[in-house]
Amino acid sequence: MQGFNKYYPPDYDGEKHGSLNSYRGKHALGDRARKLDQGILITRFELPFNIWCGTCNNHIGMGVRYNAEKKKIGNYYSTPIFSFRCKCHLCDGWFEIQTDPKNTRYVVVSGARQKDEEWDPEENGGFAVHDTDGNSAPVDPLAALEKTTDAQIHQTKVQIPRLESLMDVSDRYNSDPYSLSLKARKHFREDKKIWKEKEKSDTQVKDRYALPTNLSLAEEDGETIKEAKEQWRKGREEILLRDSKRRKLAVETSIVPSSSGLSSTSSSAVVESLRARVLINTARQSRTSTNSASTFVNSRKSLLRNR
């Protein structure tokens, strides 16, 4: 397992040395920075194409990696141009490859030559890359002219008027930005005042009727007020109708209704029967409690006798 701890010698001073590399007199990149004072950095470079070594004349395949001396040699506008100097692994020869930002490629400068592998399809009886359909019919000049005429008519009748209208709108809105901003802020203040008043009145209504604070009330306009009055009238009629039905039902189910044809003799008979039923239930309860008490006393006596 790789260790992550560092050893700090006793004479190490963080303010004086700054880092352990400075204390030991080494660069953070190690041996790769041994020529950094010359502007050269040792880096890993991979061949971008096949080459022939100029010293031993051996073939070196694309993708072979070398420890190359990387150095900045110039600029193409703001893009730096780098040079990579490598030593052939088959001999003691050196070759140099540079970047070409203008053509987005690499170029062999010295010590080797690039293997020519470019293939032109037109020279070998084929077609260009952008023209893969070799059997396409030639362009009809009349159709091309008609297409160009339609494009010009569309540009004259549609695109140009649209652009002119957009420019007029832009000029109107950007001619005097201060006055437009002043008008917008004035309109915002008026709307804010109305909104504050409505919020205050809504809060009073919610507090009066104990409504939820997050309840949104409807806007008070003529249509809303008319609808609310109509709903209140219907609700009032329903409540009155319900109360009248309840009163009528109470009168009809009363104990001694005034409109019934029952005589006093029948009502007294009903009362006497209820009284007799209550007396019978009371006597039955008393007998049950007496029997349970006598049973308990007899059980206690038998226990005492057995002792």
Image: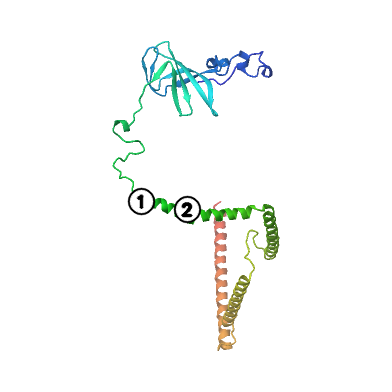
Q: Residue 143 carries which label?
A: 1
Q: What element carries label 2?
A: helix
Quarter of the image where one finds residue 231: bottom right
> Is 202 left, or right, of 41 in this rendering?
right
Q: In this view, does 182 lie above or below 116?
A: below
Give the residue at mark 2: 155
Q: What residue type is labelled 2?
A: Gln
Q: In this view, does 305 lie above or below 274?
A: above
Q: In this view, does 89 lie above or below 223?
A: above
Q: Which amino acid does label 1 sit on?
A: Ala
Q: Is residue 75 above or below residue 175?
A: above
Residue at left 40%, top 19%? Answer: 113
Does residue 8 appear in the picture of this structure? Answer: no
> Is 293 left, or right, of 16 in this rendering?
left
Point out residue 128 in the picture as x, y percentages from the top left corner.
34, 35
Point out residue 281 in the picture as x, y percentages from the top left corner.
55, 72
